[in-house]
Every structure is written in structure tokens, then in C-alpha cells.
Image (spheres, rainbow, N blue to C red):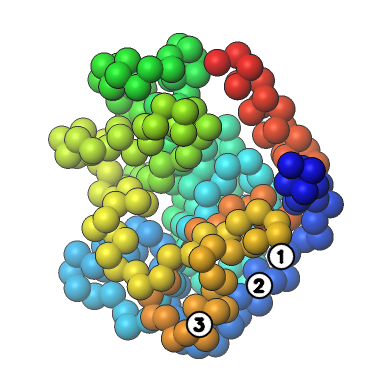
Amino acid sequence: MIKKLFNRLYGDYLMPSRMKEYENIIIETKNQGFTFLSVRDVCTLSASNQLPARYIVYRHDIDSDPITARKMFEIEKKHNVRSSYYFRLSTVNIDLMKEIEIFGSEASYHFEEIATFAKQKHIKAPDEIIQKLPIIKELFFQNLTRLENRLDYKMTTVASHGDFANRKLNIVNLELLKDKDFREKCGIVCECYDQGLMQHFDTRINDAPYPVYYEPLSPINALQQNKQKIYFLVHPKQWRSSFFYNTKENLTRLYEGAKW
């Protein structure tokens, strides 16, 4: 327990920036001839059987730190590579999202309406959440539409956020988009955990907290193993410690847990 606490404190507040490591991964991947695609690109190109032979998707889930997200975006602009960024309502940065889209990458919605509704209504029974899905779907539609109106563009892919409330309920936020008709109403072509999307990759990598850093292997290891189609999920907080954003996230988690 003490070791876990130390690792958490180190990762949140003491860990040196890993932005140079992030840039080196991009450089090495680019040097090996990979095409950088967004999630939206994969959905579009796969529909017409036009995916390249070697490609990599950098998917950024902006859970807590939009400042580090911008730093990552600046590195990607420097090397002219495309990727996808998904923002929670609590981390939405309209100017940054518009810049990402103008550049040719993708900025979209990291949704969590089931978890939010459960916490707000103090619901802890999975059956009750299932009964409330029509209400929660409407909340998702309203949030998506409101965000699109602020951005002035259509978001066609979204990513489900994983919250402690989802783990307690044993219901993922993705449950909202299992209804095909509702997806069509929202104009959602693809969700980031769709099997139809995942089948286009031979390797899926997640970044991880200190001291693990990568699961199940690093992008460099994947390149050494001659992987051809890589999906790399990135969270800014794993690459640069931020006293403000990590403290905010930790206090919010404690408050929501106590209140729920």
C-alpha cells in the first residue's frame, strides 16, 4: 500500500516530463514509414478499403490536463502527423479543439453521461441505470449537439470515458451507443471501442501510470516486433505531472465518491 501511494504521488507530482520521449516515439515511427491516421480516418478509409499498409493511430483521452494535450499537439504539428483527441466536458478547450481540426487531426467528445447521471442522482443499482437509459441518451444528445454548435463542426467519432462509477455499477458509458438508431440520430459513425474499428489493428497499446508506462508493450517494442497496424491510447497526465490538474482530479474523485 505504501509503495502504491508513493508511485501515485511520484507520478502525479514529481515525475519529470516525458515529452521528449513522446517526440522520439513519433520520430521513430515516422522514420519507419508509418502513416499517421486519426480514428476518423480509419473509419473512412476502411469503408472504402483504402487503408495503407502501415499505419498508427494516436488516440488522446483528455481526462484532466488540456495544457499537456496542447504540448503534445504542438509536437505533432512540428512533425506534421495526424491523431485524435477526445475531450470530456470538464476539459473542453474550444480554441484548441478548433486548432486541432484545422490542422487536419480530429478533436471530439470523451463522453461519460451514464457515470455522471448515476453520481448526480445517487444511483448505485445497475437495473435502475438501465431503466433510465432513455433519459441519459437524451442528455448525451444534448451535450453532443451543444458542443458541436460551439465548435461549428460535426463530430462523427466519440470515445467512452471510464469512471469509478462505471466500475462500481459494472456498466460502461458505451452502453449508450449500442442502439443503432440512436447512433444514427447523433450522427456517430464510430466509437473508439467498436469491434469494427479494433479489427483494423494488430497491436493495441495503452500508456500507464508510473512505473509501468506502457501496457502490454511500448510503441518502440511494437516497431521492433514489426507490427504494422498500431493503436496507441495516450493520456496527457502520464507524460507530464501537473500539480494543478492532478490535485483537481484527485480532490474531485474524493468529493464525488463521498457524495455518491
Q: Amino acid at mark 1?
A: Met
From this view, report whether residue 259 is shown above or below residue 202.
above
Q: Is residue 13 above or below residue 232?
A: above
Residue 158 occupies which quadrant of the picture?
top left
Q: How many marks?
A: 3
Q: x, y percentage for residue 61?
A: 52, 49
Residue at the image point whose x is 47% and y is 28% from the top: 168
Image position, residue 205 (x, y; %): 49, 64
Q: Quadrant of the C terminus?
A: top right
Q: Are marks 1 and 3 in contact (CB under 8 Å)?
A: no
Image point (56%, 46%), residue name: 62
* Pointer 1 residue: 19
* Proximity of marks 1 and 2: CB atoms separated by less than 8 Å: yes
Q: Secondary structure at mark 1?
A: helix
Q: Quadrant of the N terminus?
A: top right
Q: Give the residue at mark 3.
A: 223
Type of amino acid under label 3: Leu
Q: Earlier in the sequence, mark 1 or mark 3?
A: 1
Nearest the viewer among 176 and 100 is 176
Q: Give the Cα distance between marks 1 and 2.
A: 6 Å
